[in-house]
Structures are given as C-alpha cells and as structure tokens.
Amino acid sequence: MLGGMQDWGLTLDKIIAHARTNYGDREIVTRSVEGPIHRQTYAALYDRAQQVSHALWQSGIAQGDRVATLAWNSWRHMEVWYGASCMGAVTHTINPRLFPEQIAWIANHAEDKILFLDLTFVPLIEKIAGELKTIRTFVILTDAAHMPQTSLPNAVAYEDFIAGRPTNAIQWGAFDENTAAGLCYTSGTTGDPKGVLYSHRSNVLHALAANQPDCFGVHAHDVVMPVVPMFHANAWAIAFVAPMAGAKLVNPGAKLDGESVYELLESEKVTMTAAVPTVWLMLLQFLQANDKKLTTLKRVAIGGSAVPEKVLRTFEVDYGVDVIHAWGMTEMSPIGTLGALLPKHQHAPIDERMRLKLKQGRAVFTVEMKIVDDQGKELPRDGKTFGRLVVKGPAVAKSYFKNAGARRADGTVLEEDGFFDTGDVATIDPDGYMQITDRAKDVIKSGGEWISSIDIENIAISAPGVACAAVIGVAHPKWDERPLLIIEPKPGEQPTREQCLAHLEGKIAKWWMPDDVVFVEKIPLGATGKINKLALRETFKDYVLPSAQAAE
Ligand code: AMP
C-alpha cells in the first residue's frame, strides 16, 4: 500500500524559492573579484538566477547540457549555479587550481557548451581556448565597465548577458528529482579525473542531512562564510544549506589569505565558516602574529584533510571556537561524518575531548559506513582494527560520468553489496567515531604492518619552527617501506632533524618513528589545498634512507 502524501520533487529551485519567500531580505555579501564588497538579497538571487536561465535558454542551452563555471565563491557564481541547474541544465564547477591541460581535458570530457569565468581566469582560458572543443560562449563574470580586452571567441560580460531578461524563466523546476543538477570532477590523483554527477534529489537530501543540529546546525540567525570553494564538492553543501536555513551568506571571492579571511569574519560578524586545514593555518598565523581576536565566530568546519591537533586546540582553547571536524569526498556530495561529541563525552576532560575531536567523527544520517578487509568482510568496530572504509547512501555516487572506471556491467563502481569504496583506510570505535588512518595508497607498509602517515604528520606539524609536515613511505630493503618525514620550516626558522624527531618521541609507537627527516622550501599542495603526496613520492622516489644503507 502506498502512502497518501503529495509528490513534491526534491529539486533545487525549491531551495531558492523558499529563501526568497521566507528570508527574502537576508543578504549575500561578496568580496568581489573587482575589489569592492558587494551586497544583495536572496530575493535578488532568485530573480537574477531566473534571468540567467532565460539567457541560457535563449542561447540554445537545453536541459541536460553542461554549463561550466571557473569561478570563486560569489553572488554571480551562485546565480549561474541555481540558474543553470533549476532549468534542468547541469552546473559543472571546474577547479581552477588544476593544471591547464587538465582543465581542457575535463571541459572536453564534460562537453561543456558555455563557460562562465571570473576575471582572474581569463588569461588561463585564453591560453587553452584552442583546445576547448565544445565551448561556444565565454561569459566573463563582470560588468561592461570591467570587461577586459580578450581573444576569447564570443566573449560577453555577465551583466550584459543577463541584462533585460525576464525574471520568469522559460524552463524552471518541475522535472524529475533524479535529474542531473551538478557535475564535479575528482582531483584525479590517479588516472584521468572522473566526474561525479549529482542529482537534484541527492543535493537536496544531502543539504538537509548536512544541516542537522550535530552537523553544521546553521540557523537563520547565523552568518555563514564558506571559504571552501563552490568548485570543491559544492562548497560542502553550504551554498544549499544557507538559503535553505535563511542564514546570511558571506563569499570571500578570490582572497583566501589569513588577513583577508579575518577581515571578512570580523566585518560581517561571521558565526560559522568552513575550509580545509591549510586555510586555517594561514588564519591562525595571522591572528597570532598580529595579536587579533575572533569576536563573533562560534563554529568552524574543517575537513578535506585531517585537522592537525595544533589547529584544533588553538581554535577551541585559545579562541573559544567550536571545531567541527568533517570527513567526506566529492563522491559523497561530500559530507560523510562530522565530529560532534556524544552526550557522554560533552563534559569529558579536555584531552579526552580533543582526542575524540581529532577523529573524523560519526556518520551523518543518510550515510551508512563500515570497514572491510580485502575480501569485503566487515571488520570489528573496536577503534583499533584498520580496514577499507566503504559507504552507502542517497548522496553517494554509484557511477562516474560516462561510466568512467566502471567495475560492473551496469556501469557502476560499487562493491558487490552496493557499498562504495572510499579509498580511505580507517578505524571505527565502539561509539561510532571513525578515524582515517590514511588514503589506501598513502599508507606506509612496514614489515607487513601499516603505519599511518596522517597520525605522524599531525604531531610533527606542532614541532617548533615547522610550517607544514608530510610523511611518505620510502623503499627499504628489509622492511619494504619506512617513513620519511618531510618538513617545510616556518619562514626564517631552521628546525633540525633531531628536534623534529624528539618532538615525536613518546607520542607515536617506536616502530612508526620516521627513519629520516628532509627539509624542503615548500611542500606541494594539490588542487583542493591538500598535501600532494603523489608529487612528493615522485620527488623522493630514489631517496636512500640511512637505515636502508645500513641494512644492505
Ligand atoms: P576530495 O574528493 O578531493 O574532497 O577528497 C576526498 C578525500 O579527502 C577523502 O577520501 C579523504 O582521503 C580525504 N579527507 C577528507 N576529509 C578528511 C579528513 N577530515 N581527514 C582526513 N582525510 C580527509
């Protein structure tokens, strides 16, 4: 017997319709790429997104066509994102930090028809324009007054593109909730990048899940600043969550350095923000160097890579800001777990609370997860056993765009029991707190046992004089692999090998102790701000550890 309730498709147009009707005068504030702070309301977002839809339709964009963006978080980017998706086209957010050849490859693979790009990226796209096979129109996210001289064919200023268009789009919502809404390629650290194709339903459900009280918990009275870009897995759902909840939204535009982020946090009275750890390292360095306080910020979501203990403690203890440690991936829309403490841990001693918060957290509703061995057999939730982390849920990918990397005849990439292999290795404790020990490919295999590079990095980063730390496995004749610690010193400081190793002493198992330490000027970061282990492994592939010489 079926239920007697209405069919109300979970489509993204419902989110901004809700924001316009119920929070129409709440603001979207942006540090514009042109410079000045820009302000508009959700009501205006709604109208201008309709104008975008109209303009796209008139330019021959049909439902299902891919509409690409290469843009920072801004009001215009949001208008394109809702305008394209709500007419049934697919918003393809491209990560500008990828190599130009990768951007061209991705745009061609996605068969993007039109590209909306920020002023910042015009020179980049001019260089590869000849390789872009399917893009017919380039819309530069600015007005006529700031329009640059450009060699891009059919280039038009965004404000001219939408000017005078009606605010009732020709095509708007009213399609199947399983219609594709967004496309985002994974960073592609192995093989070609792969596209994750979100649906309207998966995005709406994921935004509802991500805003549970123990997750982002955003209220209408919050002021939310996603420093995490919209091109990094939907700004972790915040561009959906904020209008859904009626929160004021602050977009940092192109400036993500400590000082610029701090300025906006204070001037706009931000209460909740989110980004990868590298952004917070820059902010904390700025705060400490300039003796600044955070006067309005209450919560900071940190994810994308593990939160270093130093960052966690500094936010929580020195600045009184609650850290929400988040784990997820592009394929999960992206949130999988969040680090809110269970009631029984709320009042635990500080060290115990910090220990639990350093874990990646507990599953949010809509995510099922377990750890399994290589045969797919579930492993115990004892907080000690490492296993492959696999997940299931309505906002978890089952396949990649055009069935890339398919493992099964139906084009999906799932395990036999329908779970998705995250490629992460983790433990889950009896209370359900999951802890990532490594990416499966980064784990260091020493003498048949696994060493977690992340654990060592998190401790090493708080050693005196250390700005950034990475650990990789280096070949060893006796142990197969042994850890090498790579240190980027803080500007003007010269930590020594002995100091770095002494700092780890007693905090990690003896056999996890790196066999050597090397110092580099800059640890390479990938396109989403995470340490690029692939590049490091390449750099140090012929590195001979002193212990390897001794063993031979
Ligand atoms: P991406 O799809 O680029 O967001 O990358 C997803 C991957 O980032 C995950 O599979 C993890 O390996 C890593 N990751 C994300 N969040 C965390 C976290 N909080 N701690 C450790 N690793 C993380």
Image (cartoon, grey):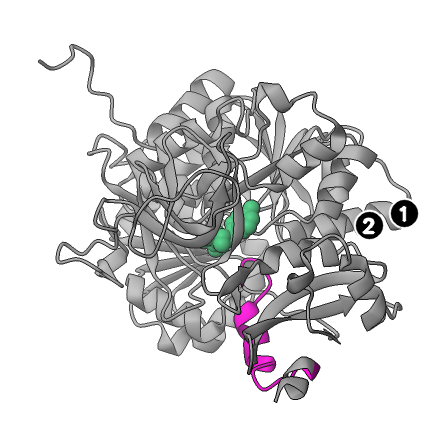
Query: Are the two marked residues, 2 and 1, in contact with CB atoms closer than 8 angstroms?
Result: yes
- Label at residue 290: 1
Asked whether the viewer can see residue 348, the reply is yes
Asked whether the viewer can see residue 140, the reply is no
Residue range (magenta): 527-546
* The C terminus, quarter of image: bottom right
Residue 86, quarter of the rendered image: top left
Q: Nearer the viewer, residue 218 or 499?
A: 499
- Mark 1 Cα-neighbour bin, 10 Å: few <14, some 14–19, many ≥20: few
Question: Residue 386 appears at what percent x and percent y?
Answer: 47, 50
Give the answer, above or below, for where 67 lies relative to 202: below
Question: Residue 384 appears at what percent x and percent y?
Answer: 52, 45
- Mark 2 Cα-neighbour bin, 10 Å: few <14, some 14–19, many ≥20: some
Q: Which residue is mark 2?
A: 286
Q: Residue at x 60, y 60 (%)?
A: 453
Question: Residue 305 appears at what percent x and percent y?
Answer: 57, 52
Give the answer, above or below, for where 121 lies relative to 507: below
SS type, badge 1: helix
SS type, badge 2: helix
Q: Nearer the viewer, residue 150 or 525?
A: 525
Q: Residue at x 17, y 57 (%)?
A: 408
Q: Residue at x 44, y 39 (%)?
A: 336
Residue 542 colored in magenta in the image: yes
Q: Amino acid at mark 1?
A: Asn
Residue positioned most to the left: 1
Question: Residue 121 appears at what percent x and percent y?
Answer: 54, 64
Left or right of 247? Residue 407 is left
Residue 299 colored in magenta in the image: no
Left or right of 406? Residue 481 is right
